[in-house]
Amino acid sequence: MVDDEFVMDMDSSKLSGVSNVFANISRTKKTNLSPVKEPWGKIPPLAKGQFHYLASIWLRAGAEPQHGIGGNVLEFRFASYFQNYMVLQRGGKGALIWGFGEPKAVVSLTFHLEWIARRTSDLQGHENSTMPKGRGHEVIVSDDGIWQIRLPPTEAGGPYEIRAWSTVSGTNLDIKINSVLFGDVWLCSGQSNMEFRVEWMMGGLEELKNASSFSNVRFMEVMQASSYAPILEPIIRSGWAQPNEATLKEFSGACWYFGRRLQKTLRIPVGLIGSYYGGSALKTWVDREGISNCLKQIAKHRPRIYDDAVLWNGMVKPLTQLDIKGVLWYQGEADSYEDHNSFLCLMPAMIDSWRKHFRQPSMPFGIVQLACPPEQKHPGWSSVRWHQTADIGVVPNDILRNVFMAVALDLCDPKSPYGSIHPRYKIEIGERLLLGALSLAYHIPTPFQGPSPAYSSRVDNKVIVTFRDGPIVLRGNSASAFEVCCGYSNASRSDSSWNDCSQWDAVKQAPRICVVELLVMVLKMLS
Protein backbone atom coordinates (compact mmCIF):
# COMPACT_ATOMS: atom_id res chain seq x y z
CA MET A 1 0.00 0.00 0.00
CA VAL A 2 1.28 3.44 -0.83
CA ASP A 3 1.29 5.44 2.40
CA ASP A 4 1.07 8.76 0.60
CA GLU A 5 -2.68 9.31 0.31
CA PHE A 6 -4.26 12.49 -0.89
CA VAL A 7 -7.47 14.41 -0.85
CA MET A 8 -8.72 14.80 -4.41
CA ASP A 9 -9.91 17.98 -6.03
CA MET A 10 -13.68 17.86 -5.72
CA ASP A 11 -13.99 19.07 -9.32
CA SER A 12 -12.16 16.00 -10.58
CA SER A 13 -14.03 14.00 -13.18
CA LYS A 14 -13.41 10.92 -11.06
CA LEU A 15 -15.88 12.24 -8.49
CA SER A 16 -18.95 12.23 -10.70
CA GLY A 17 -21.53 12.72 -7.96
CA VAL A 18 -20.59 16.00 -6.34
CA SER A 19 -18.52 19.06 -7.09
CA ASN A 20 -17.29 21.69 -4.66
CA VAL A 21 -18.63 19.88 -1.59
CA PHE A 22 -15.34 20.26 0.25
CA ALA A 23 -13.34 23.36 -0.49
CA ASN A 24 -10.70 23.42 2.24
CA ILE A 25 -8.90 20.15 1.60
CA SER A 26 -5.53 19.47 0.10
CA ARG A 27 -2.80 16.88 -0.30
CA THR A 28 -1.87 15.26 2.98
CA LYS A 29 0.45 12.45 4.00
CA LYS A 30 -0.33 9.80 6.57
CA THR A 31 1.16 6.49 7.62
CA ASN A 32 0.26 3.42 9.62
CA LEU A 33 -3.49 3.90 9.73
CA SER A 34 -5.20 0.54 10.04
CA PRO A 35 -7.71 1.05 7.17
CA VAL A 36 -4.87 0.82 4.68
CA LYS A 37 -2.86 -2.04 6.12
CA GLU A 38 -2.37 -5.09 3.94
CA PRO A 39 -1.25 -7.74 6.42
CA TRP A 40 -1.72 -10.56 3.89
CA GLY A 41 1.01 -9.17 1.66
CA LYS A 42 1.18 -7.33 -1.63
CA ILE A 43 -1.82 -7.04 -3.91
CA PRO A 44 -1.15 -8.89 -7.19
CA PRO A 45 -0.17 -6.54 -10.05
CA LEU A 46 -3.44 -7.17 -11.89
CA ALA A 47 -5.40 -5.58 -9.06
CA LYS A 48 -2.87 -3.04 -7.82
CA GLY A 49 -4.05 0.47 -8.48
CA GLN A 50 -7.60 -0.66 -9.27
CA PHE A 51 -9.15 -1.13 -5.86
CA HIS A 52 -10.76 2.19 -5.06
CA TYR A 53 -9.39 2.42 -1.55
CA LEU A 54 -5.92 2.84 -3.03
CA ALA A 55 -7.06 6.33 -4.06
CA SER A 56 -8.79 7.11 -0.77
CA ILE A 57 -8.88 10.50 0.91
CA TRP A 58 -8.26 11.80 4.40
CA LEU A 59 -10.41 14.69 5.60
CA ARG A 60 -8.85 17.37 7.72
CA ALA A 61 -10.72 18.95 10.60
CA GLY A 62 -12.88 21.79 9.32
CA ALA A 63 -12.68 20.61 5.73
CA GLU A 64 -16.42 20.73 5.20
CA PRO A 65 -17.86 24.02 3.94
CA GLN A 66 -19.47 26.05 6.69
CA HIS A 67 -23.10 26.87 5.94
CA GLY A 68 -25.46 29.05 7.89
CA ILE A 69 -25.02 32.30 9.77
CA GLY A 70 -21.33 33.20 9.90
CA GLY A 71 -20.42 30.45 7.46
CA ASN A 72 -18.22 30.68 4.39
CA VAL A 73 -20.68 29.16 1.89
CA LEU A 74 -24.08 30.45 0.79
CA GLU A 75 -25.86 28.17 -1.67
CA PHE A 76 -29.12 26.43 -2.42
CA ARG A 77 -28.83 22.74 -3.24
CA PHE A 78 -29.76 19.21 -2.28
CA ALA A 79 -27.43 17.15 -0.11
CA SER A 80 -24.84 15.27 -2.13
CA TYR A 81 -26.64 11.94 -2.59
CA PHE A 82 -29.92 13.38 -3.88
CA GLN A 83 -29.38 12.89 -7.60
CA ASN A 84 -31.07 11.83 -10.79
CA TYR A 85 -31.76 8.06 -10.96
CA MET A 86 -31.66 7.59 -7.20
CA VAL A 87 -33.88 5.21 -5.24
CA LEU A 88 -35.60 6.38 -2.06
CA GLN A 89 -36.88 4.00 0.58
CA ARG A 90 -40.56 3.20 0.16
CA GLY A 91 -43.12 3.29 2.97
CA GLY A 92 -42.21 4.03 6.56
CA LYS A 93 -42.53 7.63 7.68
CA GLY A 94 -41.68 8.90 4.22
CA ALA A 95 -38.32 9.87 2.73
CA LEU A 96 -36.48 12.84 4.24
CA ILE A 97 -35.24 15.32 1.62
CA TRP A 98 -32.70 17.85 2.82
CA GLY A 99 -30.10 20.27 1.64
CA PHE A 100 -28.55 23.68 2.14
CA GLY A 101 -29.93 27.19 1.75
CA GLU A 102 -29.79 30.77 2.97
CA PRO A 103 -30.74 31.03 6.67
CA LYS A 104 -34.34 32.19 7.20
CA ALA A 105 -35.23 31.72 3.52
CA VAL A 106 -38.32 29.74 2.51
CA VAL A 107 -37.83 26.46 0.66
CA SER A 108 -40.79 25.07 -1.27
CA LEU A 109 -40.81 21.59 -2.73
CA THR A 110 -43.04 19.62 -5.08
CA PHE A 111 -43.06 15.89 -5.58
CA HIS A 112 -44.84 14.39 -8.58
CA LEU A 113 -44.70 11.51 -10.97
CA GLU A 114 -42.67 12.73 -13.92
CA TRP A 115 -45.55 12.70 -16.40
CA ILE A 116 -47.55 14.98 -14.09
CA ALA A 117 -44.56 17.28 -13.63
CA ARG A 118 -44.09 17.53 -17.40
CA ARG A 119 -47.77 18.28 -17.93
CA THR A 120 -47.68 21.02 -15.29
CA SER A 121 -44.62 22.56 -16.92
CA ASP A 122 -46.31 22.44 -20.35
CA LEU A 123 -49.41 24.16 -19.00
CA GLN A 124 -47.25 26.93 -17.55
CA GLY A 125 -45.56 27.23 -20.93
CA HIS A 126 -42.05 27.62 -19.57
CA GLU A 127 -39.70 26.69 -16.76
CA ASN A 128 -40.60 28.87 -13.79
CA SER A 129 -38.02 29.69 -11.13
CA THR A 130 -40.79 30.87 -8.78
CA MET A 131 -42.73 28.29 -6.76
CA PRO A 132 -46.42 28.10 -7.80
CA LYS A 133 -48.61 29.45 -5.02
CA GLY A 134 -50.44 27.06 -2.74
CA ARG A 135 -48.72 23.88 -3.88
CA GLY A 136 -46.16 21.50 -2.38
CA HIS A 137 -44.31 21.55 0.94
CA GLU A 138 -42.67 24.55 2.61
CA VAL A 139 -40.04 24.94 5.31
CA ILE A 140 -37.76 27.68 6.66
CA VAL A 141 -33.99 27.22 6.36
CA SER A 142 -32.43 26.91 9.82
CA ASP A 143 -29.71 29.17 11.18
CA ASP A 144 -27.10 26.54 10.32
CA GLY A 145 -28.15 26.72 6.68
CA ILE A 146 -29.97 23.38 6.49
CA TRP A 147 -33.51 22.65 5.32
CA GLN A 148 -35.41 19.38 5.66
CA ILE A 149 -38.72 18.23 4.19
CA ARG A 150 -40.23 14.80 4.75
CA LEU A 151 -42.24 13.41 1.87
CA PRO A 152 -45.43 11.47 2.50
CA PRO A 153 -45.02 7.68 2.73
CA THR A 154 -44.81 6.41 -0.84
CA GLU A 155 -45.17 2.91 -2.18
CA ALA A 156 -42.78 1.34 -4.67
CA GLY A 157 -42.84 2.93 -8.10
CA GLY A 158 -41.94 5.95 -10.16
CA PRO A 159 -40.26 7.70 -11.83
CA TYR A 160 -40.78 10.91 -9.85
CA GLU A 161 -39.52 14.47 -10.14
CA ILE A 162 -38.57 16.30 -6.95
CA ARG A 163 -38.24 20.04 -7.41
CA ALA A 164 -37.44 22.78 -4.90
CA TRP A 165 -37.49 26.59 -4.94
CA SER A 166 -35.80 29.19 -2.73
CA THR A 167 -33.89 32.46 -2.83
CA VAL A 168 -30.22 33.25 -2.27
CA SER A 169 -29.22 36.90 -1.90
CA GLY A 170 -32.57 37.93 -3.38
CA THR A 171 -32.25 35.71 -6.47
CA ASN A 172 -34.94 33.10 -7.15
CA LEU A 173 -33.50 29.63 -7.70
CA ASP A 174 -34.96 26.23 -8.40
CA ILE A 175 -33.34 22.81 -8.36
CA LYS A 176 -34.69 19.38 -9.26
CA ILE A 177 -33.85 15.72 -9.55
CA ASN A 178 -35.50 13.39 -12.06
CA SER A 179 -36.10 9.70 -12.60
CA VAL A 180 -36.39 9.06 -8.86
CA LEU A 181 -37.79 5.66 -7.90
CA PHE A 182 -39.19 4.42 -4.62
CA GLY A 183 -38.30 0.91 -3.54
CA ASP A 184 -35.94 -0.76 -1.06
CA VAL A 185 -32.47 0.63 -0.38
CA TRP A 186 -29.65 -1.60 0.87
CA LEU A 187 -26.29 -0.36 2.17
CA CYS A 188 -23.35 -2.62 1.18
CA SER A 189 -20.27 -2.10 3.32
CA GLY A 190 -17.06 -3.73 4.53
CA GLN A 191 -13.64 -4.11 2.97
CA SER A 192 -12.16 -5.18 -0.36
CA ASN A 193 -14.24 -8.32 -0.84
CA MET A 194 -17.35 -6.16 -0.77
CA GLU A 195 -15.73 -3.72 -3.17
CA PHE A 196 -14.67 -6.60 -5.48
CA ARG A 197 -15.97 -5.51 -8.86
CA VAL A 198 -18.60 -7.02 -11.09
CA GLU A 199 -16.07 -7.19 -13.93
CA TRP A 200 -13.68 -9.27 -11.80
CA MET A 201 -16.09 -11.89 -10.45
CA MET A 202 -16.92 -15.27 -11.93
CA GLY A 203 -19.76 -14.68 -14.39
CA GLY A 204 -19.16 -10.96 -14.29
CA LEU A 205 -18.87 -10.43 -18.02
CA GLU A 206 -22.26 -12.04 -18.53
CA GLU A 207 -23.72 -9.79 -15.84
CA LEU A 208 -22.33 -6.73 -17.62
CA LYS A 209 -23.66 -7.92 -20.96
CA ASN A 210 -27.21 -8.11 -19.58
CA ALA A 211 -26.98 -5.20 -17.13
CA SER A 212 -29.14 -2.74 -19.09
CA SER A 213 -32.09 -5.13 -18.75
CA PHE A 214 -32.35 -4.22 -15.05
CA SER A 215 -33.11 -0.51 -15.16
CA ASN A 216 -35.01 -0.67 -11.87
CA VAL A 217 -31.82 -1.50 -9.99
CA ARG A 218 -29.86 1.69 -9.28
CA PHE A 219 -26.56 2.10 -7.44
CA MET A 220 -24.03 4.63 -6.17
CA GLU A 221 -20.64 4.47 -4.42
CA VAL A 222 -19.39 6.58 -1.54
CA MET A 223 -15.84 7.91 -1.72
CA GLN A 224 -13.33 6.06 0.47
CA ALA A 225 -12.79 8.77 3.08
CA SER A 226 -11.43 8.78 6.63
CA SER A 227 -12.18 11.49 9.18
CA TYR A 228 -11.51 12.00 12.87
CA ALA A 229 -14.87 13.75 13.24
CA PRO A 230 -18.27 12.88 11.73
CA ILE A 231 -19.02 14.72 8.50
CA LEU A 232 -22.45 15.96 7.48
CA GLU A 233 -22.79 14.60 3.95
CA PRO A 234 -20.80 11.96 2.11
CA ILE A 235 -18.40 12.57 -0.72
CA ILE A 236 -19.68 10.61 -3.71
CA ARG A 237 -17.24 8.65 -5.83
CA SER A 238 -19.80 7.49 -8.40
CA GLY A 239 -23.25 9.02 -8.50
CA TRP A 240 -26.55 7.19 -8.82
CA ALA A 241 -26.70 5.31 -12.10
CA GLN A 242 -28.72 2.86 -14.10
CA PRO A 243 -26.81 -0.30 -14.95
CA ASN A 244 -25.00 -0.83 -18.22
CA GLU A 245 -21.60 -2.24 -19.14
CA ALA A 246 -19.84 1.04 -18.47
CA THR A 247 -21.54 2.15 -15.25
CA LEU A 248 -21.69 -1.24 -13.53
CA LYS A 249 -18.26 -2.74 -14.14
CA GLU A 250 -16.56 -1.14 -11.11
CA PHE A 251 -19.43 -1.59 -8.67
CA SER A 252 -19.50 -4.29 -5.97
CA GLY A 253 -20.16 -7.72 -7.47
CA ALA A 254 -21.78 -9.26 -4.38
CA CYS A 255 -23.92 -6.18 -3.78
CA TRP A 256 -25.03 -6.00 -7.41
CA TYR A 257 -26.01 -9.64 -7.70
CA PHE A 258 -27.96 -9.48 -4.43
CA GLY A 259 -29.82 -6.40 -5.64
CA ARG A 260 -30.53 -7.77 -9.09
CA ARG A 261 -31.95 -11.01 -7.73
CA LEU A 262 -33.93 -9.14 -5.08
CA GLN A 263 -35.50 -6.88 -7.70
CA LYS A 264 -36.39 -9.85 -9.87
CA THR A 265 -37.95 -11.64 -6.89
CA LEU A 266 -39.93 -8.75 -5.40
CA ARG A 267 -40.49 -6.82 -8.65
CA ILE A 268 -39.91 -3.46 -7.00
CA PRO A 269 -37.11 -0.92 -7.54
CA VAL A 270 -33.93 -1.62 -5.58
CA GLY A 271 -31.28 0.94 -4.62
CA LEU A 272 -27.74 -0.12 -3.69
CA ILE A 273 -25.26 2.09 -1.86
CA GLY A 274 -21.63 0.93 -1.84
CA SER A 275 -19.62 2.23 1.10
CA TYR A 276 -16.53 0.05 1.52
CA TYR A 277 -12.82 0.41 2.18
CA GLY A 278 -10.27 -2.31 1.44
CA GLY A 279 -8.05 -3.50 4.28
CA SER A 280 -10.18 -1.81 6.93
CA ALA A 281 -10.44 -3.11 10.48
CA LEU A 282 -13.82 -3.37 12.18
CA LYS A 283 -12.97 -0.73 14.77
CA THR A 284 -12.81 1.94 12.07
CA TRP A 285 -16.52 1.37 11.27
CA VAL A 286 -17.81 1.60 14.86
CA ASP A 287 -18.84 4.93 16.36
CA ARG A 288 -17.18 6.29 19.50
CA GLU A 289 -20.00 5.11 21.76
CA GLY A 290 -19.69 1.57 20.46
CA ILE A 291 -15.91 1.70 20.88
CA SER A 292 -16.30 2.90 24.46
CA ASN A 293 -18.55 -0.06 25.24
CA CYS A 294 -15.76 -2.40 24.14
CA LEU A 295 -12.77 -0.56 25.61
CA LYS A 296 -12.18 -3.13 28.33
CA GLN A 297 -11.82 -5.95 25.86
CA ILE A 298 -9.96 -3.84 23.30
CA ALA A 299 -7.41 -2.73 25.90
CA LYS A 300 -6.42 -6.35 26.52
CA HIS A 301 -5.28 -6.81 22.96
CA ARG A 302 -4.43 -3.46 21.42
CA PRO A 303 -2.67 -0.42 22.91
CA ARG A 304 -3.57 2.08 20.15
CA ILE A 305 -7.04 3.49 19.46
CA TYR A 306 -6.16 6.61 17.48
CA ASP A 307 -7.82 5.48 14.25
CA ASP A 308 -11.06 4.14 15.71
CA ALA A 309 -14.29 5.30 14.06
CA VAL A 310 -12.59 7.11 11.17
CA LEU A 311 -14.60 5.29 8.47
CA TRP A 312 -17.79 5.54 10.46
CA ASN A 313 -17.21 9.29 10.54
CA GLY A 314 -16.38 9.63 6.86
CA MET A 315 -18.46 6.98 5.12
CA VAL A 316 -21.46 5.87 7.23
CA LYS A 317 -22.54 8.63 9.60
CA PRO A 318 -23.16 11.02 6.67
CA LEU A 319 -25.59 8.47 5.20
CA THR A 320 -27.75 8.11 8.30
CA GLN A 321 -30.27 10.77 7.27
CA LEU A 322 -31.32 8.36 4.55
CA ASP A 323 -33.91 5.70 5.22
CA ILE A 324 -32.74 2.24 4.20
CA LYS A 325 -34.11 -1.29 4.30
CA GLY A 326 -31.00 -3.05 5.59
CA VAL A 327 -27.25 -3.60 5.52
CA LEU A 328 -24.98 -6.17 3.87
CA TRP A 329 -21.57 -6.53 5.53
CA TYR A 330 -18.49 -8.29 4.09
CA GLN A 331 -15.48 -7.74 6.34
CA GLY A 332 -13.17 -9.38 8.88
CA GLU A 333 -10.04 -10.33 6.97
CA ALA A 334 -8.03 -7.40 8.36
CA ASP A 335 -9.05 -8.17 11.95
CA SER A 336 -7.86 -11.75 11.64
CA TYR A 337 -4.31 -10.43 11.44
CA GLU A 338 -4.49 -7.61 13.93
CA ASP A 339 -7.10 -7.65 16.65
CA HIS A 340 -9.26 -10.73 16.26
CA ASN A 341 -10.16 -11.00 19.96
CA SER A 342 -11.81 -7.57 20.06
CA PHE A 343 -14.01 -8.58 17.11
CA LEU A 344 -16.25 -10.49 19.52
CA CYS A 345 -17.39 -7.28 21.23
CA LEU A 346 -17.08 -4.91 18.27
CA MET A 347 -19.33 -6.83 15.87
CA PRO A 348 -22.51 -6.62 18.00
CA ALA A 349 -21.54 -3.08 19.02
CA MET A 350 -21.34 -1.99 15.38
CA ILE A 351 -24.68 -3.57 14.49
CA ASP A 352 -26.38 -1.96 17.49
CA SER A 353 -24.84 1.42 16.67
CA TRP A 354 -25.86 1.37 13.02
CA ARG A 355 -29.39 0.35 13.93
CA LYS A 356 -29.62 3.22 16.40
CA HIS A 357 -28.37 5.83 13.93
CA PHE A 358 -30.58 4.55 11.11
CA ARG A 359 -33.53 4.62 13.56
CA GLN A 360 -34.33 0.92 13.16
CA PRO A 361 -33.81 -1.21 16.30
CA SER A 362 -34.28 -4.42 14.28
CA MET A 363 -32.79 -3.36 10.96
CA PRO A 364 -31.93 -6.48 8.91
CA PHE A 365 -28.19 -7.09 8.84
CA GLY A 366 -26.59 -9.62 6.51
CA ILE A 367 -22.98 -10.68 6.98
CA VAL A 368 -20.64 -12.76 4.85
CA GLN A 369 -18.65 -15.46 6.59
CA LEU A 370 -14.91 -15.40 6.06
CA ALA A 371 -14.04 -17.75 3.23
CA CYS A 372 -10.92 -19.89 3.00
CA PRO A 373 -7.87 -18.38 4.69
CA PRO A 374 -4.99 -17.18 2.53
CA GLU A 375 -1.99 -19.36 1.88
CA GLN A 376 -0.24 -18.35 5.08
CA LYS A 377 -2.24 -19.91 7.92
CA HIS A 378 -3.18 -17.52 10.68
CA PRO A 379 -4.98 -18.50 13.91
CA GLY A 380 -7.00 -15.29 13.89
CA TRP A 381 -8.88 -16.31 10.76
CA SER A 382 -10.95 -19.01 12.45
CA SER A 383 -11.36 -16.83 15.55
CA VAL A 384 -12.94 -14.03 13.53
CA ARG A 385 -15.17 -16.50 11.73
CA TRP A 386 -16.35 -17.81 15.10
CA HIS A 387 -16.78 -14.28 16.49
CA GLN A 388 -18.92 -13.39 13.47
CA THR A 389 -21.62 -15.51 15.15
CA ALA A 390 -20.99 -14.05 18.64
CA ASP A 391 -19.29 -17.36 19.55
CA ILE A 392 -22.57 -19.24 19.14
CA GLY A 393 -21.98 -20.81 15.74
CA VAL A 394 -25.15 -19.77 13.96
CA VAL A 395 -27.09 -16.59 13.28
CA PRO A 396 -29.57 -15.23 14.09
CA ASN A 397 -29.19 -15.79 17.81
CA ASP A 398 -29.97 -14.01 21.09
CA ILE A 399 -27.03 -11.64 20.66
CA LEU A 400 -27.20 -11.08 16.91
CA ARG A 401 -30.92 -10.75 16.36
CA ASN A 402 -32.32 -10.39 12.86
CA VAL A 403 -28.87 -11.10 11.45
CA PHE A 404 -28.36 -13.54 8.59
CA MET A 405 -25.17 -15.00 7.17
CA ALA A 406 -23.93 -16.08 3.77
CA VAL A 407 -21.68 -19.05 4.46
CA ALA A 408 -18.53 -18.89 2.34
CA LEU A 409 -16.31 -21.71 3.59
CA ASP A 410 -16.73 -23.64 0.36
CA LEU A 411 -15.88 -20.70 -1.90
CA CYS A 412 -12.12 -21.10 -2.00
CA ASP A 413 -10.35 -19.59 -4.98
CA PRO A 414 -6.60 -20.25 -4.65
CA LYS A 415 -6.01 -19.30 -8.29
CA SER A 416 -7.72 -15.92 -8.07
CA PRO A 417 -5.55 -13.37 -9.92
CA TYR A 418 -6.47 -10.93 -7.16
CA GLY A 419 -5.02 -13.16 -4.45
CA SER A 420 -6.65 -16.09 -2.67
CA ILE A 421 -8.00 -13.67 -0.08
CA HIS A 422 -10.24 -12.32 -2.84
CA PRO A 423 -12.30 -15.26 -4.15
CA ARG A 424 -14.20 -14.50 -7.34
CA TYR A 425 -17.38 -16.34 -6.32
CA LYS A 426 -19.45 -13.22 -5.61
CA ILE A 427 -22.56 -14.48 -7.42
CA GLU A 428 -22.81 -17.28 -4.87
CA ILE A 429 -22.35 -14.76 -2.05
CA GLY A 430 -25.07 -12.52 -3.43
CA GLU A 431 -27.45 -15.44 -3.83
CA ARG A 432 -26.91 -16.65 -0.27
CA LEU A 433 -27.41 -13.15 1.10
CA LEU A 434 -30.64 -12.97 -0.87
CA LEU A 435 -31.98 -16.14 0.76
CA GLY A 436 -31.30 -14.74 4.23
CA ALA A 437 -32.86 -11.39 3.37
CA LEU A 438 -36.01 -12.99 1.97
CA SER A 439 -36.46 -14.95 5.17
CA LEU A 440 -35.56 -12.34 7.81
CA ALA A 441 -36.16 -8.98 6.13
CA TYR A 442 -39.19 -9.86 4.01
CA HIS A 443 -40.65 -12.75 6.04
CA ILE A 444 -40.89 -14.95 2.97
CA PRO A 445 -40.32 -18.54 4.16
CA THR A 446 -36.97 -19.38 2.56
CA PRO A 447 -34.40 -21.98 3.65
CA PHE A 448 -31.16 -20.04 4.08
CA GLN A 449 -29.15 -21.93 6.69
CA GLY A 450 -27.00 -24.95 6.00
CA PRO A 451 -26.67 -27.93 8.34
CA SER A 452 -25.33 -26.93 11.75
CA PRO A 453 -24.20 -29.06 14.70
CA ALA A 454 -26.97 -29.50 17.27
CA TYR A 455 -25.01 -31.47 19.85
CA SER A 456 -22.15 -33.92 20.24
CA SER A 457 -21.82 -37.11 22.24
CA ARG A 458 -18.96 -39.45 22.99
CA VAL A 459 -19.18 -43.19 22.46
CA ASP A 460 -16.01 -45.03 23.41
CA ASN A 461 -13.27 -43.44 21.31
CA LYS A 462 -15.64 -41.71 18.92
CA VAL A 463 -17.36 -38.36 18.90
CA ILE A 464 -20.76 -38.32 17.24
CA VAL A 465 -21.90 -34.92 15.99
CA THR A 466 -25.62 -34.59 15.30
CA PHE A 467 -26.69 -31.95 12.76
CA ARG A 468 -29.90 -30.02 12.45
CA ASP A 469 -31.33 -29.01 9.08
CA GLY A 470 -30.05 -32.13 7.33
CA PRO A 471 -29.69 -34.44 5.58
CA ILE A 472 -26.18 -33.75 4.37
CA VAL A 473 -24.16 -35.34 1.61
CA LEU A 474 -20.38 -35.27 1.44
CA ARG A 475 -18.93 -33.82 -1.74
CA GLY A 476 -15.46 -34.92 -2.78
CA ASN A 477 -12.97 -36.49 -0.38
CA SER A 478 -14.75 -37.13 2.91
CA ALA A 479 -11.44 -37.41 4.74
CA SER A 480 -10.90 -33.65 4.40
CA ALA A 481 -14.51 -32.55 4.84
CA PHE A 482 -14.22 -31.38 8.45
CA GLU A 483 -12.06 -29.13 10.53
CA VAL A 484 -12.36 -29.72 14.25
CA CYS A 485 -11.31 -27.46 17.06
CA CYS A 486 -11.77 -28.25 20.71
CA GLY A 487 -11.75 -26.41 23.98
CA TYR A 488 -13.81 -25.66 27.00
CA SER A 489 -17.38 -24.65 26.30
CA ASN A 490 -17.49 -22.13 29.15
CA ALA A 491 -19.20 -19.22 27.37
CA SER A 492 -18.07 -16.74 30.03
CA ARG A 493 -14.47 -17.07 28.87
CA SER A 494 -14.34 -14.27 26.32
CA ASP A 495 -10.59 -14.73 25.89
CA SER A 496 -10.74 -18.46 25.13
CA SER A 497 -7.83 -19.74 23.08
CA TRP A 498 -8.91 -22.45 20.65
CA ASN A 499 -6.35 -25.00 19.57
CA ASP A 500 -6.53 -27.34 16.60
CA CYS A 501 -6.98 -30.97 17.59
CA SER A 502 -4.24 -32.71 15.65
CA GLN A 503 -5.35 -36.07 17.02
CA TRP A 504 -8.79 -37.29 18.00
CA ASP A 505 -7.28 -38.48 21.27
CA ALA A 506 -7.31 -34.86 22.36
CA VAL A 507 -11.07 -34.92 22.15
CA LYS A 508 -11.36 -37.79 24.60
CA GLN A 509 -9.35 -35.84 27.15
CA ALA A 510 -11.73 -32.85 27.12
CA PRO A 511 -14.91 -33.72 29.06
CA ARG A 512 -16.51 -30.43 28.03
CA ILE A 513 -15.90 -30.67 24.33
CA CYS A 514 -17.16 -27.96 22.03
CA VAL A 515 -16.94 -28.48 18.29
CA VAL A 516 -16.59 -24.88 17.24
CA GLU A 517 -15.91 -25.05 13.55
CA LEU A 518 -17.12 -27.45 10.91
CA LEU A 519 -16.81 -27.00 7.19
CA VAL A 520 -20.54 -27.42 6.82
CA MET A 521 -20.73 -25.69 3.49
CA VAL A 522 -18.25 -28.12 1.99
CA LEU A 523 -21.25 -30.35 2.51
CA LYS A 524 -24.05 -30.02 0.03
CA MET A 525 -27.35 -29.44 1.77
CA LEU A 526 -30.30 -31.50 0.59
CA SER A 527 -33.56 -30.53 2.25
Image (cartoon, rainbow, N blue to C red):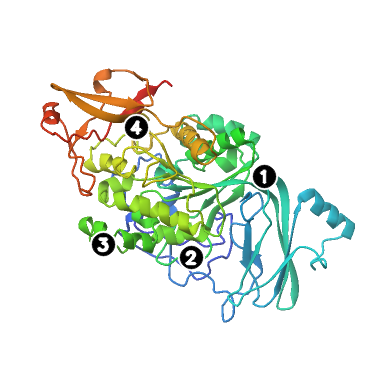
Where residue 231 is drawn, which disc sits there? 2
As displayed, is residue 80 above or below residue 527? below
Amino acid at pointer 3:
Arg
Q: Tell me which numbered mark, 3 or 4, is placed earlier along the sequence.
A: 3
Question: Disc 2 or 1, which lies upstream in sequence?
Answer: 1
How many residues crowd around disc 2 within 10 Å: few (fewer than 14), some, or many (20 or more)? many
Q: Nearer the viewer, mark 1 or mark 3?
A: 1
From this view, report whether residue 452 is shown above or below residue 133.
above
Q: CA distance from mark 2 to mark 3?
A: 23 Å
- Between the residue at mark 1 and the residue at mark 3, the CA separation in whole angstroms equals 46 Å
Tag of residue 156: 1
Q: Which mark is residue 173?
A: none
Q: Name the N-terminal-most of marks 2 and 3.
A: 2
Residue to which mark 3 is pinned: 304
Q: Earlier in the sequence, mark 4 or mark 2?
A: 2
Residue toward you, 410 or 51: 410
165 to the left or right of 212: right
Give the mark nearer the N terminus: 4 vs 1. 1
Task: Characterize the local packing of mark 4: few (<14), some (14-19) or many (20 or more) Cα atoms within 10 angstroms.
Answer: some
Q: Label 1: few (<14), some or many (≥20) within 10 Å?
A: some
